[in-house]
Image (cartoon, rainbow, N blue to C red):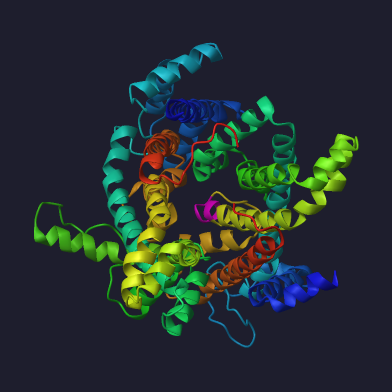
Amino acid sequence: MARLLAFILANRALSAGLAILTAICIVAVLGPLLVDTALSRVGAVPPRLPPSQLYPFGTDGQGREMFTVIIVALPQTLKIGVTAGLISLAIGVALGLIAGFVGGLLDAVIRTASDVMMTIPGIAVMVLIAANVREMTVTLMAVIIASLSWMIATRMIRAQTLSLRDRGYVQIAILNGASPLRLVFVEVLPNLMPFIAASFVMTVSQAMLATIGLEALGLGPQNELTLGVTIYWAQFYSAVVRGMWWWWAIPIGALALIFVGLMLTSIGMDGFVNKRIGVRS
Amino acid sequence: MYLDYIARRFGVMLLVIFLAVSINFLIPRLMPGDPVEAQLMQLLSQGGGNLGDIAAMVDSYRARFGLDQPLWRQYFAYWESVLTFDLGFSLANYPERVASAISGALPWTLGLLGTATLISFVFGTLLGGLMGWPQARRAWRIFGSGVLLLSSIPYFLIGMVLLYLFVIVWPVFPAGGGLPFGQTPGLNWQTVQGIAWHAALPLASIVLAETGAWAIGMRGMIVSVLGEDHITLAEAKGLRPGRIFNRYAMRSAMLPQVTRLALAMAHIVSGAILVEVIFSYPGVGFRLFQAIQAKDFFVIQGIVLMLTVTLAVATFILDLIYPLIDPRITLRRKG
């Protein structure tokens, strides 16, 4: 644990990325408790006001208070990203371990399935589903995105499982007659932790990117505010051309911060992962 | 060995196309209600219109897609229409066919994305090379880190910022469209100028966002190439650093970049849907956005199908060429 902490502190990219993400998460968790969320509804405040002392981030074209909008939208956006990331990571770890350990026909099926899914452009399928469901919600969105982004984790975990399986200590455990469950959970899984962490960050970032894309196309959740939906409305009411920069630039700034944080973390973790086991992916 | 590999990749392609067509068929039918009627009724309630026309349209669509027949028969009928490139009509601009809507938009997207991908490939590869080269100026590394951070931000967000800066704050570029309003495209200098003028901002947003991704890949490659024997030999021969960089390091690190360029070309059509939306650029992405807005169901379906099938075919062609351009890619049977 202490070694992990020392590594994080020594790695500038990782510590900067984690600091940004931690700050965002604190705002996302505490923010909604401290503001009056009613101000994020249409018509709560006078519309089209630039940032002022009373409304620090201004108000949008439909009378929402932008500061409250960001505070309310941030946790929803993160919720989609993290839920989708966790679901696809769970699928990826399970399928990757099975493919790597069992091999044979099962491996071939899983490998072909992930090849096929990788070739189908995710955004196309999402557009199709999102255009057809009656009501889009944050949870449904996370599930759809997860079902289209489990392949990266599957491939990464499978490749690592294959290389771990041939290591001496795993072979010895097999010779000692360890049960398959013990092999997976005691010998292999703990050594996969760095890769699981790295593919989690990558998957969350992918999921967020897909989410924002769908939302900006107008296929996001209808009754819940997220950062992407806010950008969609700004775009829908031509906020850019009307010069209402606070309406679109602030959610974009928030998103940019999340993406930069995720990328720095991912770059930093890459060093961690490579240093420990010396992998090529 | 090679035949085995081709057969497998061909199988994957067929599977993708099969799945894409099936998904396209099934998803609308899994949803409650009659898709055609629901969509047409919605159009009617939005736009007024004549009830008699709509009823006739519903009937003709029902007959055409055989929505009263058993599901398996509808499925085969759907395959038949897909195989004959008959994707139906646009509901929003009724007499227009979906196939012609797509083919009208496709050249715009191919032109924009093709140019943007090539430009960011050249800049990114050079920048990545300089970032990984120890003798390069420190400034390159600092500049490069900035470009890397920029590449983590989705490109349509960069597009919105550019739109604000160069259309509102300092109006030098047009706000949207593909050509000056009212100008008909022709083979003359004026058309070329108009297209370039309108494509400048969408192009810039893609290039700004993409360059970093190319640079990351190249930097990694150049660092690993620097450890190889032929670089040591070149240094021992006392060659100028510039020559070692160009002829020895860049050249051998380039190969994986070129393969990635080919792969990026396959993603070209689905690459920048949202950039087109931000700049109302008349490509496939903008058409898709309009179709979603108007609930123009057959256009959505047609574009989605086209995106998937082109990607599947392009990936297959690349898989065939891969082993030929990069001998380091080994064809493993299992692994």
Q: How many marks?
A: 0
Name the residue located 73 percent from the left edge and 46 percent from the top edge. A164
The furthest residue to the bottom: A53
Give how far across and how far down residue B304 sits, in percent.
45, 38
Relative to A28, does residue B135 appear above or below in the rendering?
Answer: below
Is B133 covered by the magenta stretch?
A: no
Residue A22 seen anywhere in this rendered image of the structure? yes
Residues B5 and B64: in front is B5
Give how far across and how far down residue B142 sits, in percent.
48, 81
Residue B280 seen anywhere in this rendered image of the structure? no
Relative to A202, does residue A30 appear above or below in the rendering?
Answer: below
Quadrant including the C terminus of chain B: top right
The part of the image, by quadrant, that contains residue B61 is top left
Relative to A177, does residue B81 appear above or below in the rendering?
Answer: above
Name the residue located 40 percent from the left edge and 68 percent from the top edge. B233
Give how far across and how far down residue A277 sits, in percent.
70, 58
Residues B228 and A149: in front is B228
The part of the image, by quadrant, that contains residue B54 is top left
The part of the image, by quadrant, that contains residue B176 is bottom left
Magenta part mainly helix, strand or loop? helix
Relative to B94, does residue B164 appear above or below in the rendering?
Answer: below
Name the residue located 61 percent from the left edge and 34 percent from the top edge. A111
Give how far across and how far down residue B2 sits, in percent.
43, 30
Say left or right for B320 vs A49.
Answer: left
Say left or right for B209 vs A125.
Answer: left
Q: Which residues are magenta?
A: A213-218
